[in-house]
Amino acid sequence: MYEVAHLNYNLQVLLDMVGLIQGTTLGVLLVILNKRKYRSTFFLGLFLIFLSLKLITFISTSIGISEVYPKLFLLPFSFSWLLFPLFFIYTQQVSMLSDKKTYYWVLIPGIISFLGQFAIFLLPYDTKLAISQSFWYDFTLVYLGIFFAWGIAIWNLRLLYHHRIEVHNSFSLVAAKELHWARIFLIYSLATSLITHLLFYLEPQNYYFKILFSVIDLISIYWVSYHGVVQRNVLSVLDEKGRYHVKNLKTLPENIQPAPTASEELEELMVQIDDYMIRSESFIHTELTIVDLAEKLKVHPKRISTAINTICHQNFNSYVNQFRIKKAELLLQKQDGLPLSIEGIGHEVGFHSKSAFYSAFKKETGTTPTKYKEKAAL
């Protein structure tokens, strides 16, 4: 039994060491990447660095370093007050809401927590031991920190929900712009946080549980690192032309919404939009944005978005996909004279991938392109 426990003990430390080394390395890489154009990764890099440094506490506890070096007792690396706020600021800066006020104040409790931990760390061992055994130490540093982190994570999910709405109102290609990976990470973090705290409460010395905790942290580190490297700022596509900027148009200030437009005017504008989309077939351009459409019609993008949402009861992405699917239907009906595969037809009408084409086609027609083609051939 001792050998099994000893093996698990070493495995847990090994996993945490891997997470510490690779997490800090990848975190520094993301901080450096922040210098690139259209990429905000500074706070995500800090998030990874602090998430990795947190593992030092688990490593020192597992190997009993404070028993040999009492001065290292209560290392100031518990960042429960700081991690989710850092991720929150990152997602705000990389999202469609990056032009809004950044909520830097969410970092203040985490900074205060770290300073408090550091001050306690400098105290004599006996004093630190007495503090660690007090009710207020666990209540403030652990429990309040956990609930604060959960609150910020839930707020972050709400921010990503509004971001997703903005993306679908601005882009015809939403892949890599929805920050779906960030939403998955937050849900994963909330779920695993609840599970780990429950398991730790039930059996705090269970080695198998500790290994599970280490694996959970490793998954978080690699998941965030990969997506942080490939994710660019979502607004950058619009920022290359200027946020909602249309040439030869007197644009509205960004912090002021367009005045409500009469129903008749919106319907008239919608006729113009429909007519332009049919004549130009601009929907076949995969990266079509609402700004591109606004530049051609010399109308503010927010007016176009309002017209599509109000008259058609759908967002810009769904509106554009309607035209793509209609053209795809025509091409599928003429397959005998065309060398294109079904996937090729998807690319021909403006979809960037087979999965996106199939998903939009089924949503619009209730069937798949393959079945539609078979039925049309009868």
Image (spheres, helix red, strand yellow):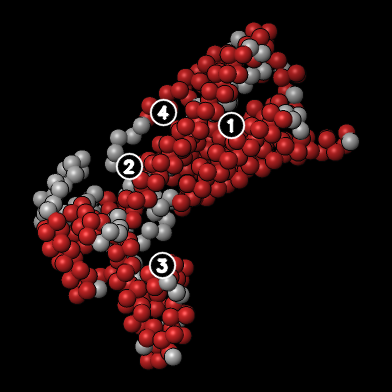
| Distance (Cα) linking label 4 and label 2 | 16 Å
Which residue corresponds to mark 1? 53
* Residue 155 falls left or right of residue 187: left
Where residue 34 sits, quadrant-wise, is top left
**Of the residues shown, which amino acid type is indicated by label 1?**
Leu
Which of label 3 and label 2 is nearer to you?
Answer: 3
The residue under the point 18% across, 41% down is 256
Please report whichever mark, 4 or 2, sits nearer to the chain's N-terminal start.
2
The disc at residue 106 is 4
**CB of mark 2 within 8 Å of CB of mark 1?**
no
**Taking 359 as reference, is 14 above or below it?**
above
Categorize mark 4 by other alpha carbons within 10 Å: few (<14), some (14-19), many (20+): some
Residue 367 visible (yes or no): yes
The residue under the point 57% across, 47% down is 222
| Distance (Cα) linking label 1 and label 4 | 20 Å
Instruction: Give the image location of residue 31, x and y in percent.
Output: 45, 40
| Distance (Cα) linking label 2 and label 1 | 28 Å
Where disc 4 sits, the SS reads helix
Which of label 3 and label 1 is nearer to you?
Answer: 3
Where disc 2 sits, the SS reads loop
Please report whichever mark, 4 or 3, sits nearer to the chain's N-terminal start.
4
Where residue 329 sits, quadrant-wise, is bottom left
Where residue 248 sits, quadrant-wise, is bottom left
**Of the residues shown, which amino acid type is indicated by label 2?**
Ser
Please report whichever mark, 3 or 1, sits nearer to the chain's N-terminal start.
1
Which residue corresponds to mark 2? 98
Where disc 1 sits, the SS reads helix
Which residue corresponds to mark 3? 363
Please report whichever mark, 1 or 4, sits nearer to the chain's N-terminal start.
1
Please report whichever mark, 3 or 2, sits nearer to the chain's N-terminal start.
2
**On-image quarter of the C terminus:** bottom left
Categorize mark 2 by other alpha carbons within 10 Å: few (<14), some (14-19), many (20+): some
